[in-house]
Image: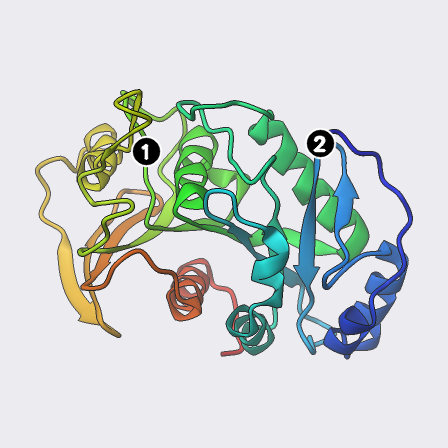
Amino acid sequence: MISKFKPLLVSASLLAFAASPSLSAAADKAGCGGETACEIEQGQYFIHLPESLPADKPLGAIFYLHGHRGKAVNAIRNKGFQRMANDLGVAFVAVQGVEGTWSFPTAPRNLRDESTFFDTVLADLTDRFGVDTDRTMLSGFSSGGFMTWYLACEKADRFGGYAPIAGAFWEPLPLECPSEPPYLFHVHGTADTVVPLAGRWLGGGKWKQGDVFESFAIWRRQNGLADTAPKSFSEGGLKCDRWQPEKGLLELCLHDGGHSVEAKWIKRAWNELGSMKGWKTKG
């Protein structure tokens, strides 16, 4: 789908979200927000603005990619995601996949150049809302998690950090990533049967989800960490292993549940990322 920008009416819900004058002005000028999509070339995204933001603080953004055949507007409607954005004082940006899918390199269908598209999303957010592209984090669930891994692999510094949930690379896994290591915070359920940690075959054996541990091994090998023991710890129901390259971070956190996503995992990743990069966070 290729769409050109059309002026749209600002939804009443967006005006309620943007309590500060600067954010209200940005919303008025943007012509989209809340459940009204921001239309750009090749697609659309939805944005929830935080209720308030100090005048001297740049606007950061958490991006969220839905699962297979999902709808970004449903993420925008999610009260847990809204509270997270308000608590942190960041924009919450839900991006829509073409026909509910993501076109990563090994996907069954490739309907869009996602690399170019996400560059366009970032540029549009800067123009419309003044988002500071240095203060961003990309998260995605399931199929959105697959896309998150591939974007991190291709160009780690496109976003400040990455927080994929229940989704890594697909077979055949890349031999290496052309990018420096990202700040990557991965969460996965040990009882997940939709996207198991070891991956699974789909489409009658045509495609295979990759193994999460092997996906991490790619980053570890190319950064001299293949034989390095991780720092292990438990936090908030998660059991985590963390490897520290010279730049970036690789973290795998497991919970004992199934195929699920929780705002608190994304919020934790943002706070960890902010601490490492010297950002001030609200909550």
Relative placement, left or right, of 166 versus 78 is: left
Element under label 1? loop
Instruction: Give the residue type at disc 1.
Output: Phe
Q: Quadrant of residue 255?
A: bottom left
Q: Where is mark 2, residue-wise? A: 42
**Residue visible at 42% across and 33% down?**
150
Provide residue 13's location: percent of width, then percent of height: 77, 72
Provide residue 151's location: percent of width, then percent of height: 47, 35
Could you say which is closer to the camera, residue 256 or residue 117? 256
**Residue visible at 55% across and 73% down?**
88
Q: Where is mark 1, residue-wise? A: 169
Provide residue 34's location: percent of width, then percent of height: 72, 64
What crowding class fits label 1: few (fewer than 14 Cα within 10 Å), some (14-19), or many (20 or more)? many
What crowding class fits label 2: few (fewer than 14 Cα within 10 Å), some (14-19), or many (20 or more)? some
Q: Quadrant of residue 282?
A: bottom right
Instruction: Give the residue type at disc 2.
Output: Gln
**Is 44 situated above or below 77?**
above
Label whose residue precedes the other's in the sequence (1 or 2): 2
